[in-house]
Image (cartoon, rainbow, N blue to C red):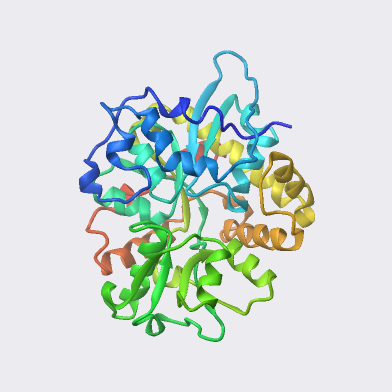
Amino acid sequence: MPTIMIASMYGCLVGRRNRRHVSWEEISMSSIVSPEQSLAGGRVNRRAVLRGGLALAAAACVGLRSAGFALAAGSGRISYMTPAPFALSFAEVLIANANGHFKAEGLEVDIIPGANGIQPMQQLMSGQIKIGRTAGIVMATSVEKGVACRAIATLAHDSPLFIVSASTNPINGPADLKGASIGITSPNDPTDLMLKAMLAAGGLADSDVTRQTSADNAGSFALVQAERLKGFIGNAESINRARATGAEVTALNLTSFMPLPGQVYVAMDDDIANSGEELVAFLKGVRAGIEDILDDEGYKNTLETLRTLGLHGIDDEKTASAVIKENVSNWLIDGRDRLLFNNSEKWASGLDAARKIGVLGEKSDDDFYTNALVEKAFRV
């Protein structure tokens, strides 16, 4: 059984030119890997990366064994980064790789676990990866600050993020945030930006809440139960795992506060122009992986494959299946025939909402996404 390529993750981060279009300071993004650590003369400093957050992200994925497909000479190879350590939420790419769909497209994909939603953008900017996955709001704010990138596909149309609280002291809307301590994964990452949108919707200032760094997992709910947090920003996996312990959980989805696409695949404009065939091959492989999951009734084969890969946290099949089912529902919002397509109406609504709260300026909607590659991939 082929598995995820962790051993090569450092190799794929070294030796490619720096393609930053704006400075790290201008982007003003926070990440575990700092600009000083990650860039040295336009290249990633391997020793610094080993000291920094990318090594931590890899360490969080111990058990994902290192191997890959042996491809014919001349086959394409690209690097792809997730916006968090490997989890069920990234099943579409893990299954695509394990089931040989990238290989079938003549492509080898190094799948690299990120630490947060900002890190894929940083690695794209510096030329270390070809494709990253992140929240639509993170990509949009990057474009606003001058990064020459755009979404080449939408995976999750709605935000996969919720504000999670105890049912005994629930957060049902912005009014419940005033004076609260709220857990976010990292400053300026998707969890922080979605919290900002929720505050703005309620006419509240950023200073009306206290932000605390917390992991997006069921462990953060223990901080809620201990009243150290009133709530935290988390995803379906965190919610389902907390509920599996018998906890009474209230979860409010954040899409209504910021309706930009929840999760998108992002590439730099020059790679879209110059490496389009590789990106198309990636999208074809992902689509095939998604189709495998959709055709897998009860997700038993999917879970068995992920278990074989060494993915942790799937021993409770009922909870794991519920997480996958929620993700699938989000992928299918526009229907199976429109998988991975960017929805122009969704983008227009989300970009308008982001402009209203001052996150974006007046760039054209067309600056943020393209359907050219998905149309080519699926012969529309």
Q: Position of residue 238 (x, y in %)?
A: 58, 64
243 sits to left or right of 275: right
Q: Position of residue 103 (x, y in %)?
A: 64, 27
Q: Position of residue 257 (x, y in %)?
A: 40, 71
Q: Quadrant of the C terminus?
A: top right
Identify the residue at horizontal 42%, vertical 51% (top origin): 117
Q: Is residue 325 above or below residue 10?
A: below
Location of residue 123 by image quarter = top left
**Number of numbered discs visible in the structure rendering:** 0
Q: Is residue 287 above or below residue 202?
A: above
* Residue in front for this viewpoint, 104 or 372: 104
Q: Position of residue 260 (x, y in %)?
A: 41, 61
18 sits to left or right of 286: left
* Residue in front for this viewpoint, 376 or 246: 246
* Residue in front for this viewpoint, 93 or 128: 128
Does residue 288 appear in this view?
no
Identify the residue at horizontal 47%, vertical 58% (top origin): 262
Identify the residue at horizontal 70%, vertical 49% (top origin): 293
Identify the residue at horizontal 51%, vertical 60% (top origin): 216
